């Protein structure tokens, strides 16, 4: 908000929390029932179940944990519903992206896998969904959920040494059964820099999009792949991380953008602010606007793009990246064209979702009329309805092509007394989330975009754990 990006948002939504039935679209009933009942006050009596469901070490039990899960999952589901209804082209939920959670257990700071739930929602309407993961940790939970499916292609760029959490994501892991070759892994070593990362990212994603031809894309933007992260060991700058987002955006395919890991909190906030600007088509200055959080950024002289690169020796070589690229291109040749829905039966879980189910009035209205209400409170009204098409099919209705200029206060050599704000205590995500619709500009056109951002309510930090994370 300091940059004025909120002024370019058409609509702000407060997504309803996901229901228990919606969570059980993927997760086991016993596991969700456990999450709904366990609290810090009764965890001693539920010790055996806590061990069974892996709520230990880096997945501790905390107050209002189930509400936290319902809120971030509800925001991802709301974004997916709007993409299916055609009421937006891009939806963002920075509080989502918890890619390690499994069907019946927590893992790596992740309790409910909102990504899997959102993809299942997208599969109601979209025949093929591409999932891209740029978190430093392998997106094992999402890969496992769709390991046997040819309607979801998963592509994960991550650090892989065999013992780095979660220990999965080898180059040779590429799906099974109908999902053979629909799972791609790009294992990288410590210290990869901007040029190498962008080169392999753009090559792999362009080849994958060409072969798979997704009708929707889900992008997990874990910020622990940035340089100077407390758990990560890459040399990526915020600009390079954002360029990955921009590269995917330019395919003009319905896009759900989610958060993820990130354990140097001031760089996470910088990164997702910059990527929000990228997605709304805004240009923002490197000078950070003055806010109550200035004390966090004093060491970098209040810059949006501090130097984060060159801190770790690059253990990747041109030859190793070429070997990965060649292997992935070989796998993509087996696709023999994009799969249609008829290539396999609808997965049983999805088939259950598509039956008659309880929907509130606004959700039924969105599905039938495409009004974009989806049961959330829309704060800033707008009647804009845009498509992701170009040319004659483009129906952009916005007239104002001039983005507002953010007010950035200059900083002198002497600090003002009121500059230093209190530090926020939690490093984790907030408990709530909000969905916003923003205009996105490219070549003079405007598209409509949805953004799910954390609510101003304070949430509990998720902790750093023991060297493992999302």
Image (cartoon, rainbow, N blue to C red):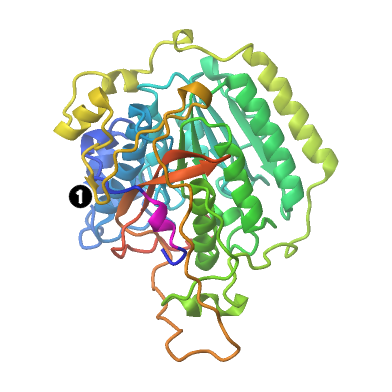
User: In the image, is 420 to the left or to the right of 194?
Assistant: left
**SS for callout 1:** helix
Find residue 77 and report its image quarter: top left
At 26% from the left and 34% from the top, the residue drawn is 22
Q: Tell me residue 345's x, y (percent).
A: 40, 11
The relative height of residue 135 versus residue 428 in the rendered view (above or below) is above
Return the x and y of residue 16 as percentages of the image width and height.
Answer: 23, 45
Along the viewing direction, whichever of 154 and 307 lies nearer the viewer: 307
Q: In which quadrant is the N terminus drawn?
A: bottom left
Residue at screen point 32% across, 44% down: 75
The answer to whether residue 424 is above or below residue 51 is below
Q: Nearer the viewer, residue 177 or 98?
A: 98
What residue sits right under mark 1 in the picture? 37
Q: Is residue 437 magenta?
A: no
Q: Tell me: 151 left or right of 67.
A: right
User: Do we see residue 102 in this rendering?
Assistant: yes
Q: Is residue 118 above or below residue 73?
A: above
Give the left or right position of residue 104, taking residue 137 as reference. left
x then y, percent, for residue 80: 36, 34
Q: Residue at x 54, y 75 (%)?
A: 297
| Residue depicted at x 53% and y 15% | 177
Is residue 455 depicted above or below 288 in this figure? above
Q: Position of residue 240 (x, y in %)?
A: 66, 52
> Magenta region's main secondary structure?
helix
Residue 127 falls in image quadrant: top left
Asked if residue 360 can be seen in this view, the reply is: no
Give, as a single range, the part of the protein colored magenta. 4-9
């Amino acid at each position: 908000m300091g940059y004025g990006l909120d002024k370019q948002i058409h609509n702000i939504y407060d997504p309803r929390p996901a229901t228990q039935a919606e969570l059980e679209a993927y997760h086991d009933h016993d596991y969700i029932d456990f999450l709904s009942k366990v609290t810090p006050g009764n965890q001693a009596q539920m010790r055996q179940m806590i061990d069974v469901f892996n709520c230990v070490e880096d997945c501790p039990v905390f107050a209002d944990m189930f509400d936290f899960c319902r809120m971030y999952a509800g925001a991802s589901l709301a974004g997916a519903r709007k993409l299916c209804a055609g009421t937006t082209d891009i939806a963002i939920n920075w509080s989502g992206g918890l890619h390690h959670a499994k069907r019946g257990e927590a893992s790596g700071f992740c309790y409910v896998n909102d990504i899997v739930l959102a993809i299942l929602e997208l599969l109601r309407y979209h025949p093929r969904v591409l999932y891209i993961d740029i978190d430093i940790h392998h997106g094992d939970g999402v890969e496992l959920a769709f390991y046997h499916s040819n309607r979801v292609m998963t592509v994960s760029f991550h650090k892989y040494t065999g013992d780095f959490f979660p220990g999965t994501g080898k180059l040779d892991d590429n799906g099974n059964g109908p999902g053979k070759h629909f799972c791609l892994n790009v294992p990288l070593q410590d210290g990869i820099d901007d040029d190498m990362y962008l080169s392999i990212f753009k090559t792999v994603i362009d080849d994958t999009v060409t072969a798979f031809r997704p009708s929707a894309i889900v992008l997990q933007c874990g910020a622990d792949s940035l340089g100077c992260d407390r758990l990560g060991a890459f040399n990526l700058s915020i600009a390079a991380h954002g360029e990955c987002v921009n590269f995917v955006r330019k395919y003009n395919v319905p896009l759900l953008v989610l958060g993820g890991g990130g354990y140097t909190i001031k760089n996470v906030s910088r990164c997702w602010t910059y990527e929000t600007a990228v997605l709304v088509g805004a240009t923002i200055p490197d000078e950070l606007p003055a806010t109550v959080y200035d004390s966090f950024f004093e060491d970098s002289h209040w810059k949006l793009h501090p130097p984060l690169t060159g801190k770790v020796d690059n253990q990747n070589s041109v030859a190793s990246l070429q070997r990965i690229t060649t292997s992935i291109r070989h796998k993509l040749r087996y696709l023999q064209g994009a799969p249609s829905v008829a290539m396999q039966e609808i997965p049983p879980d999805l088939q259950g979702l598509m039956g008659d189910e309880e929907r509130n009035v606004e959700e039924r209205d969105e599905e039938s009329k495409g009004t974009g209400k989806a049961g959330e409170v829309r704060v800033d009204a707008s009647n804009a309805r845009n498509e992701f098409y170009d040319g004659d099919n483009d129906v952009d209705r916005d007239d104002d092509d001039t983005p507002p200029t953010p007010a950035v206060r200059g900083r002198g050599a002497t600090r003002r007394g009121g500059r230093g704000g209190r530090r926020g205590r939690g490093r984790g995500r907030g408990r709530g989330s909000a969905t916003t619709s923003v205009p996105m500009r490219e070549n003079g056109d405007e598209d409509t975009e949805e953004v799910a951002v954390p609510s101003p309510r304070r949430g509990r930090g998720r902790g750093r754990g023991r060297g493992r994370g999302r």
